Image (cartoon, rainbow, N blue to C red):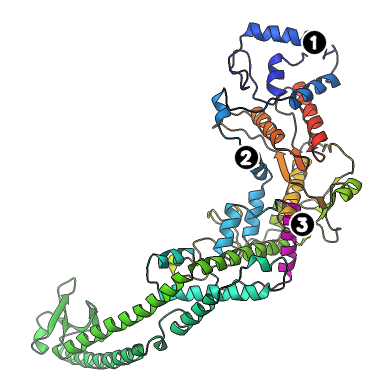
Amino acid sequence: MSGPSAAWLHAHAPLVSHWRRGAVCRHPRLAKPHSASLQAQRVASWRARHTYWQPGCTYWLPCLAAAAASAVASRPPQTSDGDEEYERPVDDIEAESLAALDWPDLCAQVASFASTPMATEIILGDGLPIGETLTESETLLQQTEQAAETDLKFDRAFDLRGLLEAVQKGRSLHTRHLNGVATTMKAAFRLAEAVKGKTALEPLMPPLDEGLSSLVDAINFCIDEDGAYVLDRADPRLGVAREARHVNRKELETNLRQWVLKLRQLGASDASQPSMMRMRSCVTVKRGRQHELPKGSVKLGTSTTGKTLYMEPLPVVDLNNTAVRLDSELQALENAVLLKLCKETAKQAGAIRAALRGITALDVVAARVGHAKWCKGLRPCFLGAQQAAAEGPVRVSAMRHPLLLQRCLEPLPRTVTPGDAAFEEGFGEPLKTVADFGDSPYSTSSDSSDSEDISPPAKKPCPVDLVVPPQASVVMVTGPNTGGKTASLKALGLAVLMAKAGLFLPLVPGSPQPSLLWFDKVLADVGDGQSLQQSLSTFSAHVRRLRLMLDAVTPSTLALLDEVGSGTDPAEGEALAAALLQRLGGTTPPPLPTT
């Protein structure tokens, strides 16, 4: 065996990409290729200064770890000079850590319990809000706790954003659209009343303008409760016009039926009912028999075979003209009412948007409550610094990984998508049914559900106790392959994130309340991170993530390292792991690596 080369020290100790003989060094201060002879000189020089290897030893001596740790600590700051790779924006290690811990999949679980497309869009798009301070996380947990005791109903609360854009551009909308405005604002008023006096929930719903109440009253006065038509009371002329149209239609229908019966008796037609052509009521007559109708009757069209003519008998021409005129007048009166309501809606657009934000915020909280009830979660609590020092920063007993637990519980509800109850579809009712796992990007599982599946329920995942003892500088998770080390590491990371986001933790019933120190960040190096697009091997990806983690850690950061130092020569990886743990163990809460 041999010790690390100078190239290794330049590449790994400062945690930059590995370079070999003749390769371009990725360190910003060493941007030129190094020849083999130059590397040999540096190796000899370094070995003369450091006696780090003894023949026959199978472990790294402490001096090597100390040297590597010193190199890590003295690593020069990144600059924009040199290699093109360093001119790119610094990767978001926090976002990568969330992905590595499967946080987006957990958010998809929670999104299944949202009642509106707006809340689903936020949860699946930006992810659940995570508290940036201890106070924010405490508030999120309090919101979930209070919402569990509050009747939050989102019946007929629709996404009005597209509608508001339309009315502000001067468009006149359908009665169902305006009825959707009224029902959504009713839901807002109902929710505002429900959260009144709830210290954590009430601030989520902004004060509702009096103009919104007036708008709802105006819409309900003019449009029926199903949003099907404009009521007569919306304009006195509507009732008069509709009565006149009714009388005219009755007379027109009676007249046409008489002609249909007469033509049938004469053998000039086989039809038993009047027909419609070019929006005018008429009768059908066999070709060559149109002389059976009075002179002056109007031909409206011919059948595709040419054997049948659509004729308007002379006595009904005036009745048809009257029907067309009355329909036009009635449509103009209804449009005037709708346009007036649309203008009033446009005036209240700002207040409506504020109400929508409140509905959405409360729906996100309600989704957290639904998730807690689904997995029978228990509210976590945050420890103070002194209490964490005395009892340990993490005490979570018998937790089950929420993603592994999913297959053992009731099917998740179907996720509401932007296509449900869409503005373009006239606000059809959103679907909230038993899980429907399809190919939709909003699905929460790739498996399809089958109502006839009688297979036994899956075995629940083994619970794990997540306990970090007090005064520990490093907590090493060891065990055999497939022993659950990585799953336990992810479970801890998700537990911390869930607590920060106001989610309850899925524990075995009867477990004590979980307690955690509040961590400002959860950084994780889990998975190989290999990327062909970025020309990263498995080990290079690990080194890259570790470098970014060292840049981002603070004294309040939880660092999770899966198989730290793996993917390279065991001796070199062991030194790298020792250096990292010495560095992290002195600047953060206890890092948790796995072997």
Q: Is residue 87 left or right of residue 145?
A: left
Instruction: Tell me the element at label 2.
Output: loop
Q: In this figure, which residue is indicated by the disc labeled 3?
A: 506
Identify which residue is drawn at 38% across, 64% down. Answer: 169
Which quadrant is the N terminus positioned in? Answer: top right
Residue at the right extreme, as displayed: 390
> What is the quadrant of residue 232 in the picture?
bottom left
Q: Which amino acid type is shown beneath numbered disc 1?
A: Arg
Number of the label disc, if any, that sits on residue 49: 1
Residue 433 seen anywhere in this rendered image of the structure? no
Q: Which amino acid type is shown beneath numbered disc 3?
A: Pro
In three-dimensional space, the C-alpha distance between marks 2 and 3, rounded to whole angstroms, equals 29 Å
Q: In this figure, which residue is indicated by the disc labeled 2?
A: 92
Task: Specify which label sits upstream in the sequence, 2 or 3.
Answer: 2
The range drawn in magenta is 133-152
Instruction: Tell me the element at label 1.
Output: helix
Residue 217 percent across, percent down from the top left: 50, 82
Instruction: Tell me the element at label 3.
Output: strand
